[in-house]
Image (cartoon, helix red, strand yellow):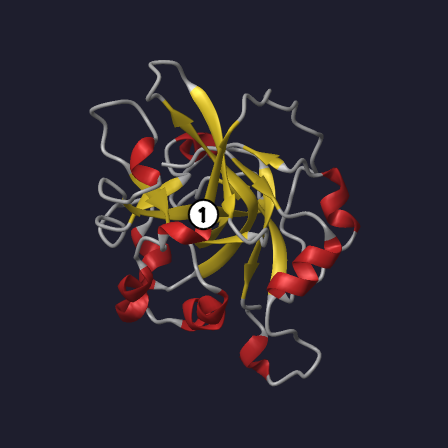
C-alpha cells in the first residue's frame, strides 16, 4: 500500500510528461503527499465531449488524497480510502461508484515511499522511475459535496499484489501481504483515461521491475502547507 509520495508540481514536467498545464494553484501545495493532503491529478475534462475546441484533452485538477464516496458525511474516510485494491474495487462500497463510472485519473509522482523492514528497522525507501521520468499512478477520482456545500475532488491509488515482484516484495512488515501501486506506461495514458468499467481490469498489472529504482533514505516528514478550503478548480 502507498501512503506517501512526492507529487509532480513543476510546470515543465507536468507539461512534458502529462500534457497538463499548471498555474499558481499549485504554489500552495507541498510535494510531500500523505492521506488528506491535496495534490494534482490528471483526468479527462467533463466538457470534453461538448465539441468545444477550447477544452483540452487532459486537465489537471487539485484533489484530496483519499477518495471520499458521495454518501460520506465528512472527510474522515480519507484515512481509509487512499488505496483501492484491484481485487475488490468493483464491490468495495467506498469505490464501487467511481469504478462503475470509470472515473479514471493519472496521479503524477516523482517517487513513492515504502518501508523496508529487512534489517528489522524501518527504513523509508524512495522508489522512482529508473530513467528519471515521473511515475504515472493509475487512480480513481470522485467529486464530493459536503453537507455544508463544499465541493472537493478526491482520489485513490489503484494497487495490485506484489508478493512475487522482484522489487516491491521487499517492502512492508514481514508476514504482511506485499502491495504496489499500478504504474502506467506513457503509451497507456489515453487508454486508461478512456477505458470503460468493463475494460479497467486490463490495466491492473505490476510494472516491470527494471522500470524502478529504489533508494533507502531516511526522510523527515514535511509540515503541511496551507491549502484553500475548496480545491475543485482546474490547474
Q: Which one is in front, 79 or 215?
A: 215
Indicate the quadrant where residue 198 lies.
bottom left
Where residue 64 sits in the image (x, y, percent)?
A: 54, 41
Inspect this view and state whether residue 235 appears: no
Q: Residue at x 50, y 66 (%)?
A: 186
Q: Is residue 27 left or right of residue 121?
A: right
Q: Which residue is mark 1?
A: 212
Where residue 75 sits in the image (x, y, percent)?
A: 48, 33
Q: Residues within 10 Å of mark 1 (few under 14, many from 20)?
A: some
Q: Say which quadrant the N terminus sits in.
A: top left
Q: Residue at x 64, y 67 (%)?
A: 19
Q: Residue at x 63, y 48 (%)?
A: 8
Q: Is residue 15 above or below residue 187?
A: above
Q: Is residue 9 left or right of residue 1?
A: right
**Total numbered labels:** 1
Q: Is residue 60 left or right of residue 98?
A: right
Q: Is residue 121 above or below residue 107?
A: above
Q: Say which quadrant the C terminus sits in.
A: bottom right
Where residue 35 sits in the image (x, y, percent)?
A: 49, 33
Amino acid at each position: 500500500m502507498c501512503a506517501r509520495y512526492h507529487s509532480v508540481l513543476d510546470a515543465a514536467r507536468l507539461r512534458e510528461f502529462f500534457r497538463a498545464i499548471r498555474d499558481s494553484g499549485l504554489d500552495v501545495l507541498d510535494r510531500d503527499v500523505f492521506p488528506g493532503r491535496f495534490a494534482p491529478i490528471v483526468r479527462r475534462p467533463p466538457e470534453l465531449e461538448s465539441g468545444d475546441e477550447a477544452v483540452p484533452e487532459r486537465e489537471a485538477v487539485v484533489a484530496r488524497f483519499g477518495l471520499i464516496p458521495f454518501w460520506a458525511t465528512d472527510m474522515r474516510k480519507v484515512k481509509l480510502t487512499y488505496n483501492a485494491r484491484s481485487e475488490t474495487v468493483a464491490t468495495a462500497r467506498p469505490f464501487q461508484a467511481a469504478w462503475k463510472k470509470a472515473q479514471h485519473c493519472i496521479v503524477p509522482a516523482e517517487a513513492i515511499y515504502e518501508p523496508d523492514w529487512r534489517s528489522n528497522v524501518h527504513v523509508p525507501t524512495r522508489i522512482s522511475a529508473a530513467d528519471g521520468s515521473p511515475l504515472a499512478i493509475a487512480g480513481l477520482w470522485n467529486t464530493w459535496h459536503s453537507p455544508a456545500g463544499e465541493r472537493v475532488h478526491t482520489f485513490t491509488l489503484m494497487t495490485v499484489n506484489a508478493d512475487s515482484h522482484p522489487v516491491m516484495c521487499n517492502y512492508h512488515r514481514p508476514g504482511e501481504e506485499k502491495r504496489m501501486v499500478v504504474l502506467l506506461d506513457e503509451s497507456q495514458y489515453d487508454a486508461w483515461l478512456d477505458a470503460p468499467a468493463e475494460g479497467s481490469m486490463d490495466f491492473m498489472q505490476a510494472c516491470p521491475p527494471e522500470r524502478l529504482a529504489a533508494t533507502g533514505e531516511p526522510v523527515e516528514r514535511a509540515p503541511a502547507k496551507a491549502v484553500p478550503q475548496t480545491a475543485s478548480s482546474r490547474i
